[in-house]
Each structure stands twice: as C-alpha cells, then as structure tokens.
Amino acid sequence: MIGDRQDPYGAVVGTRGAYGGRETVVMVARRPNTMSTAGLNRLGLKRKDEAWLHEALSSPTTRFVPLCNGKVCVAGPPASTVLLETGTWEDVWLLGEAEGTTYVAVEIDEDTWAELPVPEGARLASLREVATLLPPLESNMLALAAGLSAWHRTNQFCGTCGAPTRPEAAGHVRRCTGCAKEHFPRTDPAIIVLVTDGDRCLLARGPQWPVRFASALAGFVEPGESLEDAVAREVFEEVGIVVDEVEYQSSQPWPFPASVMLAFRATAATTEITMDPTEIADAQWYSREDVADGIVNLPGSVSIARRLIDDWIAEGS
Ligand SMILES: [Zn+2]
C-alpha cells in the first residue's frame, strides 16, 4: 500500500500520477504547502515540439491562463483562475497538462484585460494574496506561470554579451540574439528555520515588519553552500545562536519573484540572543503556550513559516 507508508519522520509516501500514465512514488510532506501540490504534468518533453505545440494551441481542450503586469486573473468566490478558451497571442508559455486539459500562460496588458470576455467579478490579484483561496492544482500552476512571467520580464537581455534575448521552447528558454547563449528560468533557494530550545522557539521581526509581527528566521543560500550550512550561518548571523540537529521539513515554491523555500527545524546549542540590527529589529524566545495564545502576530497561512510554527505548536498539544 504505497499511500499508507510513512518515513521515519512521519512524512507520507504518496503517489502522484502526472507522469507516464502510472503511479509515481514520491515523498510528500504530511500536508502539502500552498502552491506545492502537483498533479500538473509540465510536459517538459513537448516544449520544443513545434508541431505538437501548434496543434495544442488550436485544440478545444487547451485553456489560456492570462497574466497581467505580474498579477494573476481570478474570479469568484469561490476563487478560481480565469481561463480563456481562445485567443491570438504572440508569446505563450506552456504550463502543462492536467486531467485532459492543456494549460498555456499568456502575458496580456491592461487594455487587453479590459476587453476580455471574463466572468463578472473577475479581477487581477497578487498570487501571494489569493494562493490559499485557489484549488491546489491552480495555485501550483499559477506559481509556475507567475515565476515564468517575472523571469521573462527581467531577462530581456543577455547577461553575457548584452544583446536582446528571445523566448524559445514554449517560453522555458530565452536565447540570446547575439551570442546564441541559452538562458533558463532561475530559482533561488532560500532556507527558513524554526529554532527550538525545549518547549520554546525563537521568533524574530525584521526592521521593515509591523510591530508585534514575528516569524521564523530565513535567508538565501549562498554560492558553494549546503542547505544545512546555510541554516547554521543565517541563525548565527541574525541572532548569534549556534544550532545543531538541523532537520529538513518540507519545501514550497515561492515565485515572488524566483525562490523556493526550504524549511528546517533546528535545535539551539546556545540560547543567548545577539541580534544583527540590520536584519533583525527584535528576536525573542517564546513558549509554545504564548505563541498559541497569540502573543505575537504570525505570518499568514500561505507561508511555509506559518506551517513550521503551527506544526511545532501542534506537537505540544
Ligand atoms: Zn549573448
């Protein structure tokens, strides 16, 4: 029974059937993070198949997913992604296939948006704001679409020779018109870590955050650095604490604009806090009870930070 097996940390060994028409055994977190649920076959092998793409764009089972100035287009409640059945578009980006429907993203401007035959109440929104409201497949697909959109907007020129770049491979490559170098979408890994010391955890507030807000520590992984080393470095740099027993929890696509969040728990080997004032305005140890009682305002449910904190609170109940 594939779906019933568990790994030593309690993660379910589940199945996702998006590839090859058969069940695929994957490790999934005990519950999926927002935007991370798959079920979308990204059709990576079709991206350079011009004949297939041409046919797909005129197929009645293809749906176009509009994006406008970095925002996604949603209708509802209940929230749903605005899907267009037809359109004449210059640049399209293949997102993938799910349950017999092929999805293609298309970037539009606000004038085009105003003229589209969209449902009443349809609006432009930040994916960050609506991700938790959307069905999992849609939030996952829009994470891909929003990430591609941001990447296309900021990679118009070659980083090697400076010449303009042009999209290829159904929007998953940009090729330089000068030196022919291929540029691929980037994803920047960032760690986020809940540091614990017995029955208390360390939460911190960045200088730009509202008063009473507190979250887990986070930072980007540097070149030449393992994830576990990045965890230890960020914690030491930001609050002066040494950690051991760094343990991976789960991950979440975070296309704002181009990250994947890798969540960890770590045990404090030292407990005296020495803040880096450029990064941290306040950092304190909080008891499980105080956090559960709302002594600080926690990040929203869209974030993996909230997942880390909620899971830790639940362990004490
Ligand atoms: Zn170039």
Image: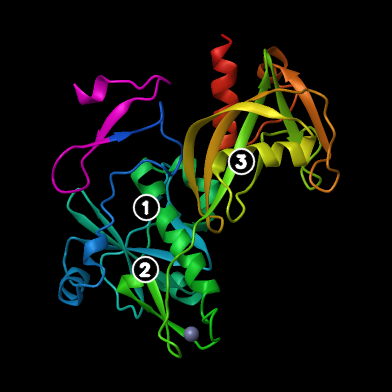
Residue type at mark 2 is His
Q: Residue at x 35, y 22 (%)?
A: 7
| Sequence-wise first label, 2 or 3 | 2
Residue 76 point in image, percent of width and height: 42, 47
| Residue matched to label 2 | 172
In the rendered structure, the answer to whether residue 195 lies left or right of residue 55 reads: right
Q: Residue at x 22, y 63 (%)?
A: 45
| Residue matched to label 3 | 229
Q: Nearer the viewer, mark 1 or mark 2?
A: 2
Residue 29 point in image, percent of width and height: 41, 30
Circle 1 packing at 10 Å, graded few (<14), some (14-19), many (20+), is many
Q: Which of the two residues, 202 or 272, is positioned nearer the viewer here? A: 272
Q: Quadrant of the N terminus?
A: top left
| Residue matched to label 1 | 141
Residue type at mark 1 is Met
Asked if disc 1 and disc 2 are in contact, CB closer than 8 Å, the reply is no
- Give the magenta-colored segment's residue range: 1-25
Q: Which of the two residues, 169 or 34, is positioned nearer the viewer here? A: 169
In the rendered structure, the answer to whether residue 47 lies left or right of residue 226 reads: left
Query: Does the image show residue 119?
Result: yes
Q: Quadrant of the C terminus?
A: top right
Q: Nearer the viewer, mark 2 or mark 3?
A: 3
| Sequence-wise first label, 3 or 1 | 1
Residue 158 point in image, percent of width and height: 51, 81
Q: Which of the two residues, 173 or 230, is positioned nearer the viewer here? A: 230
Element carrying mark 1: helix
